[in-house]
């Protein structure tokens, strides 16, 4: 091959490589910009406030105490006999 053709061919190969290199750089830059666009910023989430504590359920003892007191009042007033009072008291204490 004559020297002129080799040089032209070499110049074409070098020029093609430069174009490809430039294209690759452009693609890499575009991808970098897209990645920056979609990168989440530092998350600034505030901790949610703690859930309020549930209201305490009435203690079974207080309900039981109220029932026993009512039963005793009925017994003291004469509405209940001793046997009825003892039976009612046993039922309350079992539950």
Image (spheres, grey):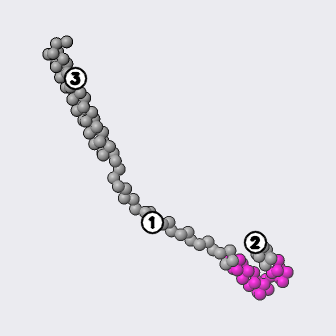
Q: Mark 2 or mark 3, which is nearer the start of the sequence? A: 3
Place of residue 50 in the rendered image (x, y in percent of width and height, measured from the top left): 48, 66
Q: Residue at x 78, y 84 (%)?
A: 75
In this rendering, the answer to whether 54 lies above or below 37 is below
In three-dimensional space, the C-alpha distance between marks 1 and 2, rounded to whole angstroms, equals: 39 Å
Image spot of residue 36 (x, y percent) = 30, 46
Say which residue label 2 marks. Answer: 95
Residues at discs 1 and 2 in contact (Cβ within 8 Å): no
Sequence-first tag of 1 and 3: 3
In-image side of 6 versus 24 (left or right): left
Write the residue at 70% across / 80% down. Answer: 65
Q: Which residue is mark 1?
A: 49
Task: Give me the residue at 32% from left, 43% from top.
Answer: 35
Mark 1 crowd level (few <14, some 14–19, many ≥20, 10 Å Cα):
few
Quarter-of-image position of residue 18: top left
Magenta segment's dominant SS is helix
Q: Secondary structure at mark 1?
A: loop
Q: Residues within 10 Å of mark 2 (few under 14, many from 20)?
A: few
Q: Residue furthest left?
A: 4
Q: Is residue 50 visible?
A: yes
Pointer 3 local density, CA inside 10 Å: few below 14, some 14–19, many at least 20: few
Which percent across, then down, holds residue 52? 51, 68
**Residue position for label 3:** 13
- Does residue 70 appear in the picture of this structure? no
In the displayed structure image, the side of residue 19 where residue 41 appears, left or right? right
Q: Nearer the viewer, mark 1 or mark 2?
A: 1
Out of 4 and 84, give the one closest to the viewer.
Answer: 4
Check the picture and name the quadrant holding the C terminus: bottom right
Which image quadrant is residue 55 in?
A: bottom right
- Range drawn in magenta: 63-87
């Amino acid at each position: 091959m004559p020297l002129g053709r080799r040089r032209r061919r070499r110049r074409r190969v070098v020029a093609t490589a430069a174009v490809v290199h430039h294209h690759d750089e452009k693609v890499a830059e575009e991808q970098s910009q897209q990645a920056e666009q979609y990168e989440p910023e530092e998350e600034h989430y505030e901790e949610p406030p703690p859930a309020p504590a549930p209201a305490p359920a009435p203690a079974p003892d207080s309900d039981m105490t109220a029932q026993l007191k009512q039963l005793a009042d009925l017994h003291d007033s004469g509405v209940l006999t001793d046997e009825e009072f003892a039976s009612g008291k046993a039922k309350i204490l079992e539950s």
